[in-house]
Image: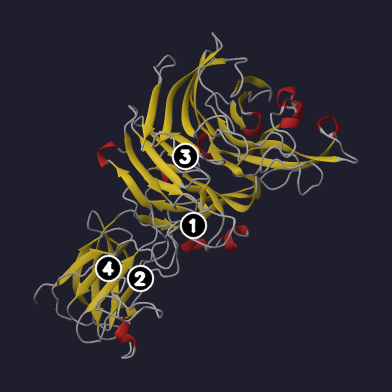
Amino acid sequence: MPANANTTTHRVGMLPLLLALLACCAAVAAIETPLEAFGTSDTDPVSFFYSRTDIKPPALHIDVYDPEGLSDGYIFVSPWRLSETGPDRGPYIYDTSGDLVWSGAADFGPATVHNPHVCQYQGADHLCLFFCFFQGTANPGFGRGMGAILDSSYRVVKTVQSSGSVPASDMHEFNLVDGGRGALLNIFIVRQYDLSPFGTFEGIGWIIESVFQEVRVETGELLFEWRSLDHEETSPKNSRLALNGNVVAGDGKTTASPWDYFHTNSIDKSWQGDYLVSGRHFATIYKISGKTGKVVWELRGQEDEPYKKDFNFSSQHDARWVSDNETHTVISLFDNAFDGMNATNDYSRGLLISINHLQKTAHLMAEYIYDDGVLMAHSQGSVEVMSNGNAFVGWGAVPFFSEYRNDGTPVMRGQVARNGSEVMVYRSRKAAWTATPADAPSLWTYSKDGTNGTVFYVSWNGATTVGSWNFYSGKTATGPWALVGAANKTGFETRFHSENFTQWSYAEAIGSSGTLLRRSAITTTFIPSEPLRAFCDDFACGPQDADPEAPLTLPPAIESGDD
């Protein structure tokens, strides 16, 4: 996008080492099992799937949807919260209709994971087949853990850790660069520091030094390291944040409450080899020389020096290169404009910014606002410029996401959980992705009385290329087998009804081209006992505490054809 483009205002409505590194054909009808809220609050509903009762994925709510205007790709989110209740924590993939594609909790168990995204690895052009996320623990303000790279079967192929005499890397950044040869990691180090110029202390003070590294993925070799305390521009004396100045600032009196004076929360690398760094508590974006580590330029969100601006920002996240040369730079960022205590704007927003280094000016090219400015996210958030010119925005502490055309028209708006749920999503991303899981499809079959029909529920967690399902029945676990029928894949879980009873079954996943992808395990059909049948209909049984006089919460009825 040219640097002199006019401003457009868009107003629209880590698990421990990855958990051990981890007869005749009946007439039929098929229907998708819908997303259903099972036993959850109105603020964070989860989906229930008969074939995968072990998972509790968020039930996405989409309230703006224009499929013709959307960019290609799937939605990548990783909801988390400080408490253990609600949806399973972990990485998820959804399609743009809001249907679940992959639950990371199904593979790794519920775990705190941040920033799942498609990344490049080993220099291949089709690296959308590798999926990266940061895995570790989370604390108010920072966390510890490691980066992990998954292949297109959702198996871990590489883990990446910080290098040298530093703690484990922090959750705020894990990003592969240079065709997957290098990885950017963020690190927070608690250090002793003389804080007497900043307040009254009877002893030593404690401070967080922000550090980032680029390490070689294959060997762990340290390629580059930058430290905030080594540079005048990022010295504590220039911090805009006072001791205890926000909810995660710290008072500096103990190692448990160090002063987080700078707070690096994103690092990006340009093709020339320089780095873009966001210092949240300085309300400033920095270009760092990849050769010397010195500050090349800084864009201050609350000052008109050294660049005169027609906008402001503060407490920002996810600063990314869009383009950069010696005279002009375009970047994107998420302007939180609020840190939980101090606000610099009436709402949070995504920004696209052009910087003219010759004239020392910065111009707002685009502003992405949620529903006329009704959201204020005190932490987290992301902005991604898509290949078709759209912008995909994640709202951080408010677990929403949005997509906009380049002319400002809203094409999608969705919720991972409702506002006020305490669920958060550090970054939301969107990208193309093709995957064939290492695991087999999951099948559960049900018959109310063992004589009049069978219902098949089938899913394949993470599969993106299934076009249809074939269903087989047998009188014993070893067959012989007969094809009952077929159904097009619909959503995460497809439901298929046969008018004939089958004791043993399996399902085949068929690709869009008609090829066999994988078979499920052979399963025996569940038949409820006579006392339980009072709580069942032709498709499933209700929970034990269900009112027998009340209608069951079940998929809608379907009609089966004649034999």
Quick check: 267 above or below 56?
above
The amino acid pointed to by label 4 is Pro
Which residue is at a point 66% across and 23% down the rendered structure image?
A: 291
What is the CA distance from the residue labelled 3 to the residue labelled 1?
37 Å
- 4 or 1: tag closer to the N-terminus: 1
Q: Nearer the viewer, mark 2 or mark 4?
A: 4
Instruction: Tell me whether the residue at label 4 lies in contact with that at label 1, contact meaning CB atoms closer than 8 angstroms.
Output: no
**How far across and down, in percent of the image, does residue 457 sit?**
30, 70
- For marks 4 and 3, give the one nearer the viewer: 3
Eye-nearest disc, 3 or 2: 3
Return the residue at label 3.
375
Quadrant of the snapshot with the N terminus: top left
Q: Residue furthest left?
A: 562
Question: Callout 3: helix, strand or loop?
Answer: loop
Element at badge 1?
A: loop
Which sits earlier in the primary sequence, circle 3 or circle 2? 2
The amino acid type, in three-letter code, at marker 2 is Tyr
Residue contact at pointers 4 and 3, CB within 8 angstroms: no
Left or right side of 441 for 171: right
Residue 26 at x, y percent in the picture: 14, 76
Residue at image mark 4? 555
In the rendered image of this protein, does residue 534 appear above or below residue 304?
Answer: below
Q: Are marks 3 and 1 in contact (CB under 8 Å)?
A: no
Callout 3, which amino acid?
Leu
Disc number at residue 155? 1
Q: Residues within 10 Å of mark 2 (few under 14, many from 20)?
A: many
- Is disc 3 surrounded by few (<14), some (14 to 19) or many (20+) residues within 10 Å? some
Res. 10 in view: yes
